[in-house]
Image (cartoon, rainbow, N blue to C red):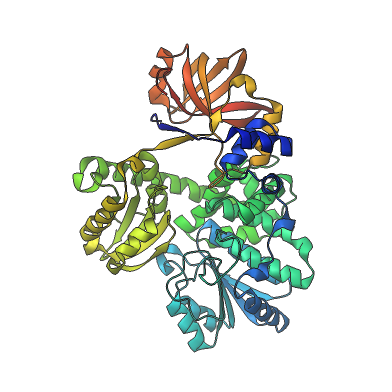
Amino acid sequence: MKSLLWQHLPCDDAESAALAAALNVHPTIARLLCLRGLADAEVADRFLNPSLDHLHDPFLLADMNRAVPRLERAVAQRERIAIHGDYDVDGITSTVILRRALEMLGGDVVHFLPERVRDGYGLQPAAIERLHADGVRLIVSVDCGIRAAEAARRARELGVDLIITDHHEPDGTLPDALAVINPKRPDCTYPDKYLAGVGVALKLVQALCDRAGKNKWLPAFVKIAAIGTLADVVPLVGENRIIASHGLASLSRGPHAIGLRSLLDACGLTGKTIDSYHVGFMLAPRINAAGRMSTPDIAARLLLATDEALGEEARALAQQLCDENTRRQQEEADLVAHAKKAIETDPAVGAHNVLVVGGVGWHRGVIGIVASKLVDTYHKPSIVLSIDGDIAHGSCRSIPDFNLLAALEHCSDLFVKFGGHKQAAGLTMEAGRLPEFRARINAYADHVIEPDQLRPRLRIDGPLSLRAITHDLVRGLDLLGPFGLANPRPVFHASGVEIVDGPRTIKERHLKMTFAQDGRRFRAIAWRAAERAEFLEKNRAAVNLAFSLDRNEYQGETYLELSVADFKAMDDQ
């Protein structure tokens, strides 16, 4: 843990006090709402109390009115329908909920999830041909397809109807499909533009359920959609917040079908209150591991398992996901070490604002995670490439202030294909053009990145003494969750905090200690901070502390714990 540049967020105290009075909430909760742009009492109340009734009419999405009747006709006439997904958590959960919904409505449904190395990314003409040969006459893409013009053309040639549902950024021209459902379409007036792929699939499920009079089915689909939504790190506001909030509550409460139940058991989450951390760091990595290390169909089969007679098979599939995840962790650790060595020993790689690093045979299933780890370590946009013969496959991750997709568009003539978001993208290119790519993307970055943007910042939501931590405040923080992008976990600042126990190093990387201030004591943990133990020993009488509040469960007891974001000497503000 390196000390960060603290950014104390300003807040209008009068506005915050008015909101606290209007909603009868703790003053700190009112401040947090104002900092998130929710100073209006009615808007803030809807945020604190998300309801499935607040979901928008799915028919506000462009082309929904074309997709739903075609699907209804396919179900009624028993035409074979194929769901074409993607190999990540978003794509797998999208596939699962749409297939399950159509089957419950009486449809003849199959699914196809591409394998990363064999099939490549996205909706491809070869997959259309394969599904057509299997007797499919209607294909629905989920979490992919918005730039699949060739696949759409092939579907037309074969007489296959294609419905595209996606959330990635469109190209200049939409594919020539029967329907293209994507809130990011320039001509789509849908009020919520930032749904995950599974959120768009859920809107299609919602529309089908509405028309069939089966609205009572929706919560079960929201539960699975929450996993994909949280895993895809989309802004947790609007409909994403509703999906995540209600889905987490359902995941915690149960009951669950045998497949999901087996996965929760394998993660050690049975009977626990499940939050965004559990999804992001326990459930999602296991589901993702299937697509990264072998075939995503393992995860899809598990989540589709509803027959209790499949208990033994479901438990075996869940264990397989755990084993694949362990293998993924080892592969990832090896590649991170190789990448860091290149960055720190080769100035041609490490001396730039955008880190572009790669190697022959690097596992394509983990290069995206490696790119994320490099961003965390160096606070620079990072692109990690796996070189396979003459072709390089890249995964790209960015810092908040750098639009990665715009940077790639600036170099688009170098790629065989590319796509994604502002913060995460993928590309394929000729391996021989890597030096040119590194030079061009860095020339672009040098023009648009200010040096200050490469300094990692810690946003401080406000002051909070340890004595001011009350049950009322904690209840309010529970209502503010789940936390994630656009609704970050609040970070508070307490000054003059004493260390009364510890710090003790745990697992060679983390520090455990107890802080005290004005007679209040809290246990705390500082992740990846072992190298700063000496600083804490020298300053144990008083430090400036930046922290979040966490609940911890141990031997059946739940207690509040401080999660340390950073600490500084008293004279270092």
Outermost residue, front side: 14
Classify residue 95 as left or right of residue 368. Answer: right
Tell me which corner region of the image, top left, top right, bottom left or bottom right, holds residue 164. bottom right
Classify residue 431 as left or right of residue 152. Answer: left
Q: Residue at x 52, y 60 (%)?
A: 296
Where residue 68 sits: x, y (%)?
Answer: 67, 76
Q: Residue at x 65, y 42 (%)?
A: 274
**Residue 180 at least partly seen:** yes
Q: Nearer the viewer, residue 470 or 279?
A: 470
Q: Count numbered badges in the picture.
A: 0
Q: Nearer the viewer, residue 50 or 344?
A: 50
Where residue 16 sits: x, y (%)?
Answer: 63, 36
Q: Nearer the viewer, residue 329 or 313?
A: 329
Quarter occupied by the N terminus: top left
Tell me which corner region of the image, top left, top right, bottom left or bottom right, holds residue 431. bottom left
Q: Residue at x 71, y 49 (%)?
A: 250
**Residue 125 at least partly seen:** no
Classify residue 155 as left or right of residue 59. Answer: left
Quarter occupied by the C terminus: top left
Where residue 171 sits: x, y (%)?
Answer: 43, 71
Above or below 497: residue 282: below
Where residue 170 sits: x, y (%)?
Answer: 46, 69
Q: Nearer the viewer, residue 219 or 545?
A: 545
